[in-house]
Amino acid sequence: MKKLLALIMAAALGAALLTACSGGTQPGDAATPDPAPAGDATPAPDAADAGDTEPAGDAAFTTVEPGKLHMSTNAAFPPYEMTTDDGGFEGIDIEVAGAIAEKLGLELVVDDMGFDAALTAAQTGQSDIAMAGITVTEERLEVMDFSDSYATGIQVVIVQAGSPIATVDDLANAEMIGTQKATTGSIYCSDDYGAEHVTEFDTGALAVMALINGQVDAVVIDNEPAKAFVAANLDDDGNPLLTILDTEYAVEDYAIGVAKGNEALLDAINTAMAELKADGTFQNIVDQYITAE
């Protein structure tokens, strides 16, 4: 085995900090300049009083910190949220959140944590939004509100090259399935095959490392991160150590989570997102990270 690229190593190290589930695109036509990178968005005039402004909605909204939009995420989910070599953040969700913040006259602040912690932070008002490839489920709707969907996520199965698990149906024969903690993939696998056949990891990268080491027989994770993990792990001859099964495991919708009842902020986010889709900015961001097939 020759390569566990920086993508895997950086994500795995990030899990130790205890700092989340499933990608797709939305249509956009006119190309526009890229939005400001996360954390570098320049507040609009008078942004210091952003807690009392209403630039993108009919009602005033407040934020955790005046003039800033705090985004809780789990930055180990390429290409949606990742860490950079200099300790910053990048990815589709990061840039989209930065573009939304800019439209709201705010500066984006990225708070990296575990996936379940990212959800809890938004639920309890410790962050303004949670954005980490989050799937909308009935259970989550009971404790938080969600924006309009901005992407479609596909859950897939990763196995070692040459594995006897050749189809999704073969998962029933797996002794142990790896998943990321608190994700829908983990929930689905526990429901379908029993919790005793599921091992949760703090990040998808750690689950993939366990697969390579033979600790689990398969990993259920979202399609885009799955492709990144497979591409990053090759043998000495440059052949993939892993493969993705052809059949999808589940199809889901991604959305931005906010505290239950925070309708003013939710309306502002939906308005901003609609504008980003209409002017092509959203699609421009997606195209930087996901190549059309």
Image (cartoon, helix red, strand yellow):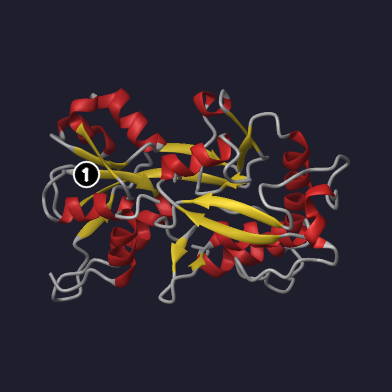
Q: Is residue 203 left or right of residue 141?
A: left
Q: Residue furthest right?
A: 58
Q: Is residue 135 left or right of residue 209?
A: right
- Dividing the picture into quadrants, the one containing residue 232 is bottom left
Q: Residue at x 16, y 56 (%)?
A: 212
Q: Is residue 5 visible?
A: yes
Q: Which residue is mark 1?
A: 218
Q: Residue at x 70, y 47 (%)?
A: 63
Q: Is residue 264 left or right of residue 177?
A: right
| Other-residue count near label 1 (Cα within 10 Å), few / some / many at <14 / 14–19 / ≥20 | many
Q: Residue at x 59, y 42 (%)?
A: 255
Decide: is 155 above or below 46: above
- Dividing the picture into quadrants, the one containing residue 282 is bottom right
Q: Secondary structure at mark 1?
A: strand
Which x, y percent locates residue 179? 29, 41
Which x, y percent locates residue 202? 31, 47
Q: Is residue 23 visible?
A: no
Which amino acid lies under the numbered mark 1 shown in the image of this protein? Ala
Q: Nearer the viewer, residue 81 or 55?
A: 55
Decide: is 204 above or below 40: above
